[in-house]
Every structure is written in C-alpha cells, then in structure tokens.
Image (spheres, coloured by chain):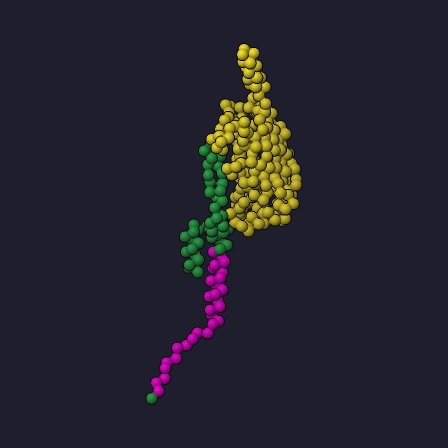
Amino acid sequence: MAGSIVFWAAAGANRGWTKTHIPIKTVDAVTGLEGIQWQAEFVPGVDFLGAALLGAGVLAGISLFVPRKSKQPKMETK
Amino acid sequence: MKTKLAILALIGVTGIVFAAPQTFDFKDPKGINNAGFKLDAPLEAINGNASGVSGTVTFDPENPGATKGKIVVATGSLMLPNPMQKQHMLSDKWLDVAKFPEICFESKEFKNVKTTGDTTMADVTGTFTLKGVSKELTVPVKLTYLKDKLGERVPNQKGDLLVVRASFTIKRGDFNINPGQYEDKVSDTIEITLSIAGASPN
C-alpha cells in the first residue's frame, strides 16, 4: 500500500487519469508555430492509485482468513 | 535585343500587377501542424490535439480578403494522453471515426479584413463539419504570409509559407455528440485551436 502511494507521488502525484503518453511542445523556428509531439511515458493517475489501494485492501482482508502457522515447542526425547 | 528586353520587362510588370493567387498545401512534412482541443467540465478536464491536418488555401497577398480554402483534420489522428479515453472518444459512442473519418472547415467569406505588413486579421465565415453534421461558423483568424521562407523550413525547396492561427469554440451537442449527456465529465463546450502552416512552392 505504502509502495503504491510512494510510486504515485514520485511519478508526479498526477490527480487526473493515468497517462501513457505525454505531450512535448516543439516550436518551429520559421513559422513560430507550437507543435505537439507525443512521447510514450507512463504517469500513474488516481485510477492507478485507487486500484493499487483496493488491491492492497483485498489482500489484507484475505490475509485475515488465512490461519497462522503456530510455532510449537519441540519435545525433547530421551 | 531591345525587343527581348521589352518583352521580359512586360512579363515582369504583368506579373506584378496581375499576381495570381497562390495555393498553399497544408500537408506538413515537419509534423508541426496541429489542431488542439480542450474541454473543461466540472469533474474532468480533457486536453488533446490532432496532427493529421491537410487541405489547401488559396491566398492572394494583394487581396487577402479573397482567401478561400478547406482544412481537413483526420478524426483518427485525435490524441489524448489516456488510452482508454482516446478509445472511447473515437468509438461509435462519441466521434465514430469509422463512419466519420474527417473533420473539416471550408471557408466561404472573409469579413473585417485588416492587413498590417505580412499579417492579416479577419473573421472567416464557413462550414464546419463534425460527425457528419455541418454548421455555419464565423471564426477569427490570423494569417501570416512569409514570402520566400519555405526554403528555411524545407531544405531544397523555394517558395512561400502561409501561417494560419485560429481559436474558436463549438458545442458538441450541436454536432450530435451525445447532446445533453455526461456534461459533468465531458464539457459541452469544446475550445479548438488551429496552428498550421501551408507551403506554396515556386
């Protein structure tokens, strides 16, 4: 859970939807026009964070129903 | 000799006085030409652009008010940063790219034409077609005529450039794009920005 929050925050804490492409602005020196080139880059959004937190919550819930392995003291045999 | 010079001079003068309108092709080899779109709904903002721009404009530097042309944007070139949003936008639920592969604007009339140097400002009335629906729109445009600048942009080519800039808004409901629906997430108002340059080789 903490890992997904750290990953989302480190990637820019994008509060929109997850992006797989980001726009890179380029300016044409002759015309002065501003063009957009799309660069492939994964930027996790709130949907990614929500899914990660939900997944972590489900795993935590499942773990409650898994029986613990109890450590039994070894019996000494003579 | 004198006759030849006289003929050449006559041709030159005729060329200056009766300069023909030039046709500019907006298929951009540099991939800079683009149409941006922005939707700002209460719950969601959508920003994207389209790079598949083509079309021609006939422009006469001596008479910018007579400019005519048609600019076409390939619907399939519309791009959004989120792949699922893009898929939805191009699907039959929204723009239906398979059925309506082009968005276009064809000019009919230039009004309020003001030219200063190589720059012309005008209000262009024309037909905007989106998702098969055509509406008449009046759009403020800025034309910049760059004489002999094509060679600086495209090596080994001589000619002129025409830069067209325009910003206007449309209502998606007017073009049968889910009218009245999902307006909290997908704004009815779409801001469109056109930044394109056309080439007229000599």
Q: On screen, A26 above or below B112?
A: below
Is B125 magenta? The answer is: no
Work out whether residue B181 can be spotted.
no
Report the side of B72 relative to A26 (left or right).
right
Residue at (52, 28) in percent of width and height:
B159
Residue B64 at x, y percent in the picture:
57, 25
Work out whether residue A23 can be spotted.
yes
Residue B155 at x, y percent in the picture:
48, 32
Report the side of A78 relative to B43 (left or right).
left
Please state the extent of the stretch shown in magenta in the rendering: A49-77
The part of the image, by quadrant, that contains residue B17 is top right
Is A76 magenta? The answer is: yes
Q: Nearer the viewer, residue B185 or A36?
A: A36
* Quarter occupied by the N terminus of chain B: top right
Report the side of A38 relative to B57 (left or right).
left
* Quarter occupied by the C terminus of chain B: top right
Q: On screen, A50 above or below B49?
A: below
Q: On screen, B45 above or below B6?
A: below
Q: Residue furthest front?
A: B1
Drawing shade for chain A: green
Residue at (47, 51) in percent of width and height:
A42
Q: Residue furthest top?
A: B2
Which chain does yellow denote in the image? B
